[in-house]
Amino acid sequence: MILNELQVNKIKGYLKNCNIENRLILGDFLDHLCCMIEQNMTEGATFDDSLKKAFSHLPGSEIKSIELFTLKLLNMETRFSYRISLPATIPFVLFGLFWMFSNSGFNVPGVIQNILLLSSVISMFALLTIGWIKDFPRWSFPAIGFCLLFSLFSMNVAIPSISDDILGFWAWVPLIITLIIAQIFKPGVEPIKNVIKKSREELFLIVYALYGFAPFILLMLSDEIHTNWMMPVAILSTLILSAGNSLFLSCERRVSRVLSVIISGVLAVVITLTASYLYWK
Amino acid sequence: MFSQEILKGTIKPLIIKLIKDERRMYGYQITQKVKELSSQKIVITEGALYPALHKLVEEGILITESEWIGNRERKYYSLSESGKETAPAKLEEIRESILMLVQLFDLKPLVYDTK
């Protein structure tokens, strides 16, 4: 006795309605429920009765709990408490503060601006180190994107107080040092394999990694702007980006996570571009 | 039926033993086999089984291969090469711990197999 396509699709639909997102768990429980139902039907029950019996033995809430527990066990958690998701936004907030002071018309001492910029960059590199040690849980993905893109971007940057030449490959030194420190605490390439595994499981994580560079992009979009009303623009855009990041880490459903990042990213860019356009107009 | 608390530490070795004997098994088959061999006294819940299976795969002890059964994919678990090497040691460890428990709880040794 093997269930037909319609019957299997009904069970698949039930699992999807229970918000079972992980492909592995969905496959496990689809086959498991089908086997339970097939066994019941072999004993003389109808499909519908067997279905009801299977669903009462394994309610959706229980399957969802098993999914969340298994993902946590495998370091593939998709949902974190606010205790974890809020600290992951610290680099965004620091960067927002730097942006606010550097582009506003207020005369904030350069030392404070430099401290804020350095703090935001260092905190991202620190997040990368911690992420490496913990096999790159989701909240560390923005740090991966930021560190790679920041290093790439900085290759074409010159630091006048040091030299007029662009940094070139010297721009990769902070990342290399970070990786060396990370290797001391956790040798091997297992964390990189985990990043690849997690990205394959959910491709949107690549977009989420690039999200880490979003504050820097907003800063570049408002380059050379010095006006008081950039302050509320910077505060608003930073809050939106931070909220998007926090929501991605705490939402239950994949659709909500994806939308939180896309909407917050687009909104922050639109606000910044609009402010930039009005200033130059 | 024994409580899950008692079975917690034995699930992984139990899975390894069953798969070692049967060569390859799928999830539902494992639950039914345990029920059958224990005369329904031991029931591995899905909440215990699937996390343990995935963890064993992550640890490299088990490997998976998928097959289409009708209109769905079934995942079969079998011992990896390194799993085949480490399985005897793991099973010996659980055997020794059970024998120790027999001693600690002052149980009649005749009920339990000795070498």
Image: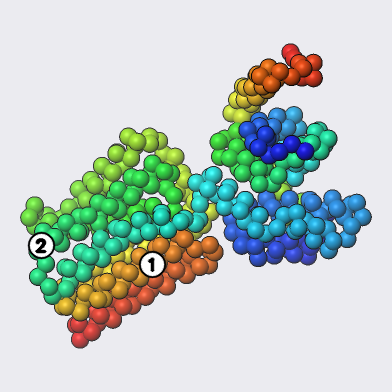
Drawn side of residue A272 relative to residue A166, left or right: right
Q: Secondary structure at mark 2?
A: helix
Q: Is residue B68 visible?
A: no
Along the line of sight, which residue is nearer the eye, A148 or A141?
Answer: A141
Along the line of sight, which residue is nearer the eye, A237 or B65?
Answer: A237
Give the alpha-carbon distance from disc 1 to disc 2, as whole Å: 28 Å
- Farthest residue to the front: give it: B106
User: Which residue was labeled with disc 2?
Assistant: A110
The residue located at (67%, 59%) in the rendering is: A60
Q: Quadrant of residue A98?
A: bottom left
Dot 1 amino acid type: Ala
Image position of A32 with respect to A186: above or below: below
Q: Which mark is drawn over residue A268?
A: none
Along the line of sight, which residue is nearer the eye, A171 or A273?
Answer: A273
Drawn side of residue A42 relative to residue B6, left or right: right
Residue B31 place in picture, x, y as percent: 75, 41
The residue located at (79%, 51%) in the rendering is: A36
> How many residues crowd around disc 1 within 10 Å: few (fewer than 14), some, or many (20 or more)?
some
**Label pair 1/2, CB-CB below 8 angstroms:** no
